[in-house]
Amino acid sequence: MEDSVTARLLDWYDKCARVLPWRSPPGTPAPDPYRVWLSEVMLQQTTVAAVIAYFTKFTERWPSIAALAAAPEEEIMAAWAGLGYYSRARNLVACARAVMERGGFPESESELRALPGLGAYTAAAVAAIAFGRRAVVVDANVERVVARLFAIDEPLPGARKAIRYHADSITPQSRSGDFAQAMMDLGATICTAREPRCLLCPLTSDCAARAGGEPARFPVKAPKKARPERHGTAYWIMREGQVWLVRRPGKGLLGGMRALPDDNWTARSDGHGTTPLDGTWRRGGVVQHGFTHFSLHLSLALYDGAQWAALDSRHGEWWPLDRLDDAGLPTVFAKAARLALVGETE
DNA sequence: AAAACGTGGCT
DNA sequence: TAGCCAAGTTT
């Protein structure tokens, strides 16, 4: 039975594989490991639709891992702005440099796993897709497909071990990279989280959840915790067509990214409301932004004073408004900046 | 081992 | 619309 699942899935992939910029068609030589790795890192917790534009931009600007490794970290962080999970960009740089140092990508799953930013999933995916190694690739798509195929009742995350065991049982010796991508295509287009399209599924006759009549019940998940709501303020300080931007600390939320000054709101607490400069401030409206683990109401304060000398050039810089798009602001601050600019022209 | 860590799209 | 969800990793 396992063999037939594997064969049916690969047959389906041969006909129906999605065409994606980082992929080579089934049965053709593997793509450049650099492109496989870069796409896999970008795709961590991120949709294909969001990744395509970034992948294209990155590979045009840095066509090889050598080019990426030689680029200033600051430029790569700015190019990553908007994609989210910014520690990925930091790890991307560190990984590129480590790979150059050792003379190229390692090909084994365990050596790949030791590189910065490559966890269990990404190491397996790169080993299988770029290097043709047999590896058991388990991401959220595979979890869903396997949980349904075998009607696994145990809730996630506890079910991970059982899911991995079953995923291993259907992973072929050869073509495990195609197999992994087939599972992900199936999960993304047919075996979707809500309303799976079982009538189109090549594995419908193998699927225990389908036989049970309630495929969407799987995977069972533990209930989630409520997201707290936080309030904070961002400060818009303008002078002669420039705005004052700071660099956030390297670790933590939006770590290492350029940003508007703020009153130190965090996931755990509201901001303290203390302004960064003396003088007159005006209300500039409120931006609402959802993070993974909290929701933020960010008030915008607009500076009317002229005490600019108090700003510390070790922590920030004047940035020209006409190049604001190049500043690489994370989305929450890009929203605030947009609001400020609309306010200024009214 | 649980929590931190972004964002945009879909229902 | 408010919540769920996505090719996870790190600490």
Image (tube, coloured by chain):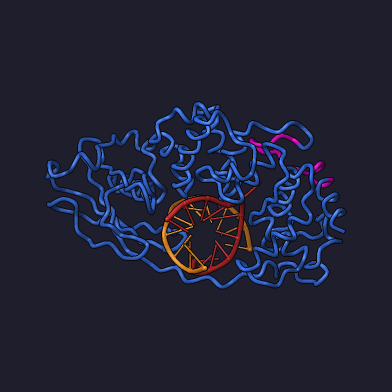
Chain colours: A blue, B orange, C red
Within the image, what quadrant is residue A142 found in?
bottom right
Looking at the picture, how far across and down is residue A216, in whole percent? 71, 67
Prevailing secondary structure of the magenta residues: loop
Q: Is residue A50 visible?
A: no
Looking at the picture, how far across and down is residue A162, in whole percent? 70, 65
**A21 in magenta:** yes
Q: Is residue A68 visible?
A: yes
Residue depicted at 70% across the width and 67% down the height: A218
Total number of numbered discs in the rendering: 0
Residue depicted at 42% across the width and 48% down the height: A331
The span shown in magenta is A11-25
Q: In this picture, is A26 found above or below A61?
A: below
Nearer to me, A218 or A122: A122
**A78 in magenta:** no
Nearer to me, A98 or B7: A98
Residue depicted at 44% across the width and 47% down the height: A87
Residue depicted at 18% across the width and 42% down the height: A312
Looking at the picture, how far across and down is residue A233, in whole percent? 28, 57
